[in-house]
Every structure is written in structure tokens, then in C-alpha cells.
Amino acid sequence: MTVPALSAVLPSPAAWATLDIGLAPTGVVGHTPTIWYGEAVVLAVAAVLIGLTARDVLDGPDAAPSTGEIGHPREWLRPERLVDLVPVVATLALSVLVWTEPLDVWLWGVAVLFAGTLALAPLVHGRRLAARVPTERERRRLAAAGIDPDGSIRVVETARPTHRNGYSIGGPLSGAVGVSRAAVETLPPAQLGAVVAHERGHLAERHALVRSLVSAGWLFAGAAVITAVFSVTTPAATAALAAWLLGERAVAVLVGRATEYRADAYAARHTSPAAVADLLRTLDGGGHHSAADRLRGLLSPHPSFDRRIDAVESLSA
């Protein structure tokens, strides 16, 4: 029996390129390795950015202390543990979209998933905090700082017991103010009042909502422009997509810094510029920072303490 040549049996390379086997993006004619490479780049960039978005939420010193039962199933079923899955689920969803849909479909999916992750970040952060009502001793300290202990004030137990910080707990439209236990116990009354006023400034001016809307606007506008210009993932489209995703992070940093300045100004109006400046100096810890700290500061949505102190002190000039 004569065995036909493989070239006579197997589809040609052009046929493989357009063959819909459920693995390559459907409806994309000429799905070449160049396109696969471009989509892999986009997926990698999006996954990294989602991971960075969740980094401070999931791994910072503000996270709730562990129960010590890391290997126990009940530990991973705690709500503050389950929210760790948000970036994982978002990244998996991105993978499915990028590898199964054409550009004009999966790009909008990336925009929606990324914007949704950003919008959920404040809620995820709130779930990660071990917030509780103040004890009687803590209520007295809050009252001494001029803070109504019966209001929406929560004390936060952190993984690092000496960590002093304040928190806006909740979503874009509502929330409560949280203060770490170390801040309640160790900050002078004026500085404790400044912490609470700063966080109330974030809530009063809906800064979480502002940040979410600006990022969503950037992502959706960029998706509309890119899908209008490109129909497949060419090298130029890959560059545009990377700039689109990285641009959102740059915009988010600028907006985040602007909201921090506004919250500082709000706190200065409701306490005093001196109290806010003193608080920032205390949190700065003497102003000695490593090269790694300075590098992280370039990408942080928080301005440097020096800049914030200068801005606050200018309010009293």
C-alpha cells in the first residue's frame, strides 16, 4: 500500500492559520506567531499591572494578622483570604479573552476587567483590614484628640503591631475611618486628630470614586481609539496597547498624589497645618530612606513626605 506524502494529507500553513480549533482567536485571518507574540506581551503587561495594583492591598503591613493556621482550610476560607483571589481570577479571565477572541473583543474585556479590579481595590482593602470598634481606653484617647468615638471610627489591628496609619474603609460612595492601634496608642492628640481628618477628607471628597472614574475613562477611551485603528495585533498595535496600559498607571499615580495633597489640605483646615506637618514628620520616621525606598516612591500614588510637608506649611504662610 502506498502511503501518501504528509504534505498531501496535512493542511497547508495558510490553512492552519485560519483553522478554528478553539485555541487561536476566532475570526482573525492570518493568526501568525507575530500576533501570538503581541498578544502574549499584552497579557503579560496586563497581568503584571493587575498584580501591582493588588500588591499593596494584599501584602502590605496593613493586612490583617494571620490566625497562625496558614495550612488550615479555615484560614483560607476567611473573607480577607478569599479576596486574594481577585487578581488571580482577573488574570485568568484575561488569558481566556486574549487567546480566544479577536482584538476588538478581548481589548474591551481587558479594559472592563482592569477597570473593575481598580474599582474593587478599596473594597478589597477594607476586607483585608481587621477593623473593630474602639475599646474604652481607645475611646478616651480618641476623645482627648477631639474625635467623636461614637462616630464611624474603627481601630485596625495590623500585621505589624508598631505600624501607624489611617485608612478610608469602604467603597467609592461610602465608608468609615480606620486608625491603626499603634496610631491610637502612640500618636499625640493633635497628630491623631490630623490622621482622622486626613482620612475624612478622602471620604468627603470621594477620592476613591475619582480615582476609579479617571482610570476607567482612560481605559475605555484608549480601547475605543485602539480598536478603531487596529484590527489585529501588529507590532504597532502591541506598542499602542503597552502604552495604553502603562499610561493608565502613570495617570493613576498623578491622580493619587493629587488626592493626597487635597486630603492633607482638608486635614489642615479641620485641625491645623502645624498638626498635619508634625504628623507627616512622625510618619516619615526621620526622613532616612534607602535607594529601594526612593525607587518605589517614583511609582507611588503618595507624594514624598517632604513635598507634602512643604505643601501643608505653605497653607499657613
Image (cartoon, rainbow, N blue to C red):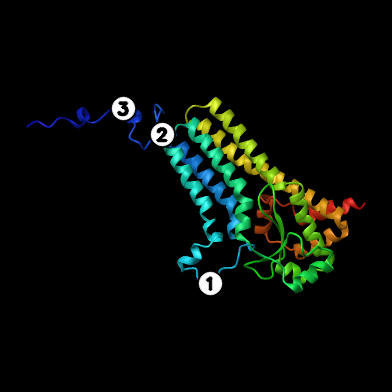
The mark found on residue 113 in the picture is: none
CB of mark 3 within 8 Å of CB of mark 1? no
Q: Give the image location of residue 305, x and y in percent.
A: 77, 56
Extreme residue toward the bottom, this view: 137
Closer to viewer: mark 1 or mark 2: 1
Q: Is residue 56 visible?
A: no
**x, y (%) of residue 204?**
77, 49
Residue 145 quadrant: bottom right
Q: Residue furthest left?
A: 1
Q: Secondary structure at mark 2?
A: loop
Residue 25 versus residue 171 in the image, above or below: above
Q: Nearer the viewer, residue 120 or 238?
A: 120
Which mark identifies residue 15? 3
Residue for point 88% across, 59% down: 274
Instruction: Give, as a three-letter code, the residue at label 1.
Output: Gly
Residue occupied by mark 1: 68
* Structural crowding at the residue carrying mark 3, measured as other residues with C-alpha within 10 Å and reported as few (<14), some (14–19) or many (≥20): few
Marker count (numbered): 3
Query: Which residue matches tag 2?
Result: 25
Crowdedness near tag 2: few (<14), some (14–19) or many (≥20) residues, C-alpha within 10 Å: many
Task: Report the residue that reaches farthest toward the front.
Answer: 150
From the image, state whether disc 3 or disc 2 is nearer to you. 2
Q: Could you tell me which secondary element the residue under label 1 belongs to?
A: loop
Query: Which is nearer the N-term, disc 3 or disc 2?
Result: 3
Residue at image point 50% right, 30% down: 104
